[in-house]
Image: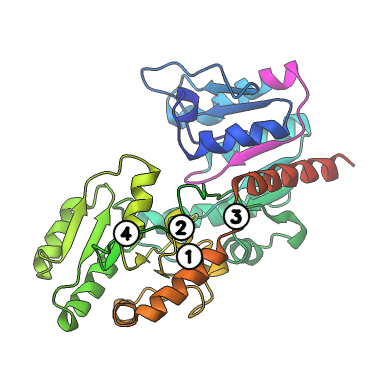
């Protein structure tokens, strides 16, 4: 497995480590090649059979590291499949391509999402979208499969680039802990909640523009922002310019997942205005807590949300978003109905079933390639 996540290799907890803790039960051994870890040594093994190999080179030399370390591992033991977690400038995919050619093993390219797709928020994202298109065209005849995590967005992206249907495998890995993310008693403190990194693809300026429109009808409207990131100063400037200082609160970092779940429950709705996403996880978590969600149709949201039944969709327009926020604020029955519908819609995101399906899907691809 070629991964861009080095946190698990440092012994840290997080989504990737949590996935591996269950994923490991489906394999005899997993070797993970990951980027360098500054000023730290990777743990040798976690979960009994997951072995980490962190590069000792600079990040741009990752392809050479993958080829060298992968060649050594392939000489030591037999493997069923090579998987590459692919994004950015596709260093993992380039390395996997070389190892697959060398070994004859089936290779699965995992594309959770593409930066800048379906919409680009920056010139960098437009560049990365172009690189992704070139990458897919270059490797579509060599990969055994492309693994994607949603039913509509990424399969559509791949089909448009000439990828055969039989090579597109939808294998979700997003799962929830329903002991944490569930409805519960809470007094609403915020009208609208945003959770996520403060980065361009999250659509935060669209959200602020929508809030300014909402304020004209509801002067006391309250938005809470839970997240950190490089746009903090620019957002504060925009809040000042829109005269929203009294309406927006930046929350301190949450201590853990339970604290995040509590923030969901004390909000009347969660808004996702993203232009591109792999999940997004936060919308699914909020739905599990019975909180109504307004979202763009990014990532899994295009699959999950049936507009007016279990959430509300909008297409990146601040006026449309404002209208939906106002509608929810003025209709408690609608909030309850959408919250209940949303909770039912995400009930299948149980960890054991989701991760088993992911592992079994990779095993099927490997078995079919071996015939």
Answer few, some or many: residues within 10 Å of disc 2's Cα (few below 14, many 20 plus, some between 14 and 19).
Answer: many
Q: CA distance from mark 1 to mark 3?
A: 12 Å
Residue 152 horizontal/vertical position (percent) = 60, 67
| Numbered marks: total | 4
Camera-nearest label, 4 or 3: 4
The residue at the point 45 percent across, 36 percent down is: 14
Mark 2 in CB contact with mark 1 (< 8 angstroms): yes
Classify 10 Å Cα crowding around label 4: few (below 14), some (14-19), many (20 and above).
few
Q: State the SS at label 4.
A: loop
Q: CA distance from mark 2 to mark 1?
A: 6 Å
10 Å neighbourhood of mark 1: few (<14), some, or many (≥20)?
many
**Quarter of the image that includes the N terminus:** top right
Q: Is residue 32 above or below residue 132?
A: above
Question: Mark 1 vs mark 3: which is more N-terminal?
Answer: 3
Report the residue marked by disc 1. Answer: 298
For image coordinates 17% across by 62% down, the residue present is: 248
Instruction: Specify which label sits upstream in the sequence, 2 or 4.
Output: 4
* Marked residue nearer the N-terminal end (4 or 1): 4
- Using the image, tell me which numbered label, if any, was put on residue 38: none
């Amino acid at each position: 497995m070629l991964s861009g996540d080095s946190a698990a290799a440092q012994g840290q907890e997080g989504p990737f480590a949590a996935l591996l803790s269950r994923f490991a039960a489906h394999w005899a051994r997993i070797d993970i090649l990951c980027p360098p870890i500054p000023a730290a040594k990777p743990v040798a093994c976690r979960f009994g059979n997951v072995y980490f190999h962190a590069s000792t080179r600079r990040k741009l030399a990752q392809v050479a590291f993958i080829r060298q370390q992968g060649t050594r591992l392939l000489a030591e033991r037999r493997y069923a499949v090579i998987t590459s977690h692919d994004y950015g400038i596709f260093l993992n995919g380039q390395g996997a391509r070389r190892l697959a050619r060398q070994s004859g093993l089936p290779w699965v390219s995992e594309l959770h999402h593409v930066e800048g797709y379906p919409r680009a928020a920056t010139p960098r994202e437009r560049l990365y979208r172009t690189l992704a298109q070139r990458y897919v065209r270059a490797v579509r005849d060599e990969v055994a499969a492309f693994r994607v995590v949603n039913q509509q967005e990424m399969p559509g992206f791949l089909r448009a680039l000439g990828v055969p249907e039989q090579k597109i495998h939808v294998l979700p890995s997003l799962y929830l802990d329903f002991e944490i993310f569930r409805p519960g008693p809470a007094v609403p403190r915020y009208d609208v909640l945003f959770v996520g990194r403060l980065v361009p693809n999250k659509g935060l300026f669209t959200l602020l523009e929508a809030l300014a429109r909402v304020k004209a009808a509801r002067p006391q409207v309250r938005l809470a922002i839970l997240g950190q990131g490089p746009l903090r100063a620019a957002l504060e400037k925009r809040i000042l310019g829109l005269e929203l200082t009294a309406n927006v609160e930046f929350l301190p970092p949450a201590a853990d997942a339970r604290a995040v779940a509590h923030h969901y429950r004390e909000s009347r709705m969660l808004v996702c205005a993203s232009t591109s996403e792999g999940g997004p996880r936060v919308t699914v978590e909020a739905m599990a807590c019975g909180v109504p969600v307004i979202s763009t149709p990014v990532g899994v949201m295009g699959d999950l949300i049936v507009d007016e039944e279990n959430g509300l969709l909008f297409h990146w327009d601040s006026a449309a978003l404002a209208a939906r926020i106002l509608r929810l604020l003025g209709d408690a029955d609608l909030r309850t109905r959408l919250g209940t519908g949303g909770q039912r819609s995400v009930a299948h995101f149980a960890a054991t079933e989701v991760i088993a399906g992911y592992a079994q899907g990779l095993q099927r691809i490997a078995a079919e390639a071996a015939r």
